[in-house]
Image (cartoon, helix red, strand yellow):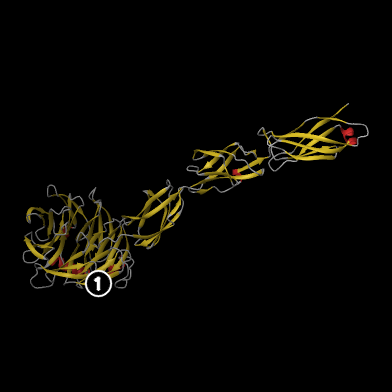
């Protein structure tokens, strides 16, 4: 249903005008129902999000409203009494029908300024743009009414199509092949073939004030203004298959992006009716503001916008709760609505950009337009604890993932972007058990290590000494051969992988024990003469490491007879120590034997042996 333009050559609708006068008188009483009013933000606010373009028929302007903040970031002067607005598919332009200027303004969305003004027929009301952006269809009500077709490259009217009586609204099928025009006075919808610019069908309805096409093109929903109903047209048969009672004086219609709901602006009911398209029933009626005229469904499906003509506001409806969450000031007598080009969230940094494969790292994503973030994924796996700190910061907890670099994606307001990359690192290995937990200092013990993160191990060490050999049996088991050590006692075993070296703990403790030894001394034959006071003894002993069964070279052996030290010698390669030394004859006769003693080392146990001194003759 069109605005009434107060000029002599335009025929009005008496009933419509009478009602609007009465509604204007009631505006003050109804204002309390519109919800919280957000103050208008300063013009040209920095970094606006996605914009909603609102035509203000009483001011001759279009307001560009930041959908995220409710601030008006630009007010664009257009023609007189602007009503219908539409966005080009690429988002670069907004086309505005100027009802009292007989023109269409073309707004450049990059600068939010009028780039061109195109003359059209008298009293243009509605604008529809082809999916390829090549054609603009302008519905005009005066001089028998019709549709002017504009070539967007030449900005010239290239055709005029005659529709029904007092056409004032139009919408295209998703593929652009059909244009549906609502004719208020003739109570019809004209179906126009856009290839030939001819009317191919006329569908009887009520006083068509607004209409919208479903996303799949299967249905057209028509607001029957004076019948307080919504007509549903089956586009396959061009027949009305259902009529749905809605609010008073339904004005405009919008369809949810998924086609599940239809939103109807009730100008007389000061409300928006929500129609379930599966059942063709009204499931909610949402109070808005006085003279609700325009309605727009956000492409992300989360919000619906409705203009309240008599109180100069726009209601913002949350589709999840079906309640008005904000009321935004507009210009005078707001009418048409169009959603501006999508402003995608951007990510400028990810901190930290790496973490363990076990997950659990809190990651901070910094950027812009992050309000409305609903999900963060790491290589498709949802993060937990997604928190929107503000419009520039989101935090999320990384899920577990196999090691490697993966992509992070962020979803905000139904739009998903690539946010950057994150590197999962193999966690440093851990040792939880060592079996056996001890072995000889000479090494050679086969030791089983149990733990985690062993895959890809590059080193196993006993203290600072590398294992003689090791085998990675699995991510939780390593078999290693203990190396020899120079000092017996406890030491920590460590495992090193590309992810790091295991942290030492009592669980990785291995104790080196000293090797046992054995001295073997041989009897010595000797002869003594009467009156001899001293004798040279030639003594010998062999030292063996009984743990390894090998001789011990380089060991010091002390030979004594009683308490008398005869001599000291160092074992040779075969472990034998040999020396000669004097000993009092009396001492020899008293003991008739000698003792060989090895005092041990940090890795070898001490040992003692005795052998006889055998007197001949």
Give the position of the N terminus as an image quadrant: bottom left
x and y, in percent, of residue 471 in the image: 52, 38
Q: How many marks?
A: 1
Residue 331: in sight, yes or no?
A: no
Give the position of the C terminus as an image quadrant: top right
Residue sitting at x 49%, y 40%: 475
x and y, in percent, of residue 486 in the image: 65, 44
In the figure, residue 567 lies in which quadrant? top right
Residue 133 sits above or below residue 237 on the image: below
Q: Is residue 392 left or right of residue 191?
A: right
x and y, in percent, of residue 286 in the image: 28, 59
Instruction: Report the residue marked by disc 1.
Output: 75
Q: Is residue 541 left or right of residue 305?
A: right
Residue 553 sits above or below residue 46 on the image: above
Residue sitting farthest toward the right: 531
Element at badge 1? strand
Residue sitting at x 89%, y 33%: 589
Q: Nearer the viewer, residue 143 or 459?
A: 459
Residue sitting farthest toward the top: 617
In the figure, residue 95 lies in which quadrant? bottom left
Residue 297: in sight, yes or no?
A: yes
x and y, in percent, of residue 524 in the image: 81, 30
Q: Is residue 187 left or right of residue 603?
A: left
Q: Nearer the viewer, residue 36 or 248?
A: 36
Q: Is residue 355 left or right of residue 29?
A: right
Residue sitting at x 7%, y 61%: 159
């Amino acid at each position: 249903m069109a605005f009434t333009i107060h000029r002599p050559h335009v025929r009005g609708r008496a009933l419509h005008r009478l009602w609007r006068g009465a509604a204007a008188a009631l505006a003050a009483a109804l204002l309390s129902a519109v919800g919280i009013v957000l103050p208008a933000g300063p013009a040209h606010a920095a970094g606006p999000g996605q914009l909603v373009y609102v035509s203000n028929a009483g001011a001759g302007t279009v307001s560009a409203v930041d959908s995220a903040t409710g601030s008006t970031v630009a007010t664009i002067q257009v023609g007189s009494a602007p009503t219908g607005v539409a966005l080009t598919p690429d988002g670069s332009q907004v086309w505005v029908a100027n009802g009292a200027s007989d023109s269409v303004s073309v707004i450049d969305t990059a600068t939010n300024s009028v780039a061109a003004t195109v003359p059209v027929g008298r009293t243009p009301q509605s604008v529809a743009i082809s999916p390829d952006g090549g054609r603009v269809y302008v519905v005009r009500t005066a001089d028998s009414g019709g549709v002017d077709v504009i070539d967007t490259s030449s900005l010239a009217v290239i055709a005029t199509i005659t529709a029904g009586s007092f056409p004032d609204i139009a919408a295209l099928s998703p593929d652009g092949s059909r244009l549906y025009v609502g004719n208020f006075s003739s109570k019809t919808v004209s179906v126009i073939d856009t290839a030939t610019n001819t009317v191919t069908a006329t569908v009887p309805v009520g006083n068509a004030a607004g209409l919208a096409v479903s996303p799949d093109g299967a249905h057209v929903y028509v607001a029957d203004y004076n019948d307080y109903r919504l007509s549903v047209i089956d586009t396959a048969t061009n027949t009305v298959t259902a009529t749905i009672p809605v609010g008073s004086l339904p004005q405009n219609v919008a369809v949810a992006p998924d086609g599940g709901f239809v939103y109807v602006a009730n100008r007389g009911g000061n409300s928006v009716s929500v129609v379930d398209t599966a059942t063709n029933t009204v499931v909610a009626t949402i109070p808005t503001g006085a003279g609700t005229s325009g309605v727009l469904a956000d492409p992300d499906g989360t919000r619906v916008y409705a203009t309240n003509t008599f109180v100069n506001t726009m209601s913002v409806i949350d589709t999840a709760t079906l309640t008005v969450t904000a009321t935004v000031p507009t210009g005078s007598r707001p009418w048409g609505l169009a959603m501006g080009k999508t402003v995608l969230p951007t990510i400028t940094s990810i901190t930290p950009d790496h973490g363990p494969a076990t997950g659990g790292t809190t990651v901070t994503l910094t950027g812009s337009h992050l309000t409305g973030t609903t999900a963060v994924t790491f290589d498709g796996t949802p993060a937990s604890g997604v928190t929107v700190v503000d419009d520039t910061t989101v935090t999320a907890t990384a899920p577990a993932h196999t090691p490697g670099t993966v992509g992070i994606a962020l979803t905000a307001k139904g739009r998903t972007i690539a946010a950057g990359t994150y590197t999962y690192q193999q966690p440093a290995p851990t040792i939880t058990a060592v079996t056996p937990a001890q072995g000889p200092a000479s090494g050679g013990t086969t030791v089983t290590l149990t733990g985690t993160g062993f895959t890809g191990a590059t080193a196993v060490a006993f203290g600072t000494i590398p294992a003689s050999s090791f085998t990675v049996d699995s991510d939780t088991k390593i078999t290693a051969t203990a190396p020899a050590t120079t000092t017996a006692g406890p030491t920590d075993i460590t495992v090193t992988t590309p992810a790091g070296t295991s942290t030492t703990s009592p669980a990785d403790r291995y104790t080196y024990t000293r090797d046992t030894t054995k001295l073997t001394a041989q009897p010595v034959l000797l002869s003594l003469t009467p009156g001899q006071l001293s004798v040279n003894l030639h003594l010998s002993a062999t030292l063996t490491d009984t743990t390894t069964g090998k001789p011990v070279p380089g060991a010091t052996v002390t030979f004594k007879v009683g308490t008398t030290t005869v001599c000291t010698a160092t074992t040779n390669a075969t472990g034998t120590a040999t020396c000669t030394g004097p000993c009092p004859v009396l001492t020899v006769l008293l003991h008739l034997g000698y003792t060989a003693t090895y005092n041990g080392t940090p890795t070898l146990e001490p040992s003692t042996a005795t052998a006889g001194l055998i007197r001949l003759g």
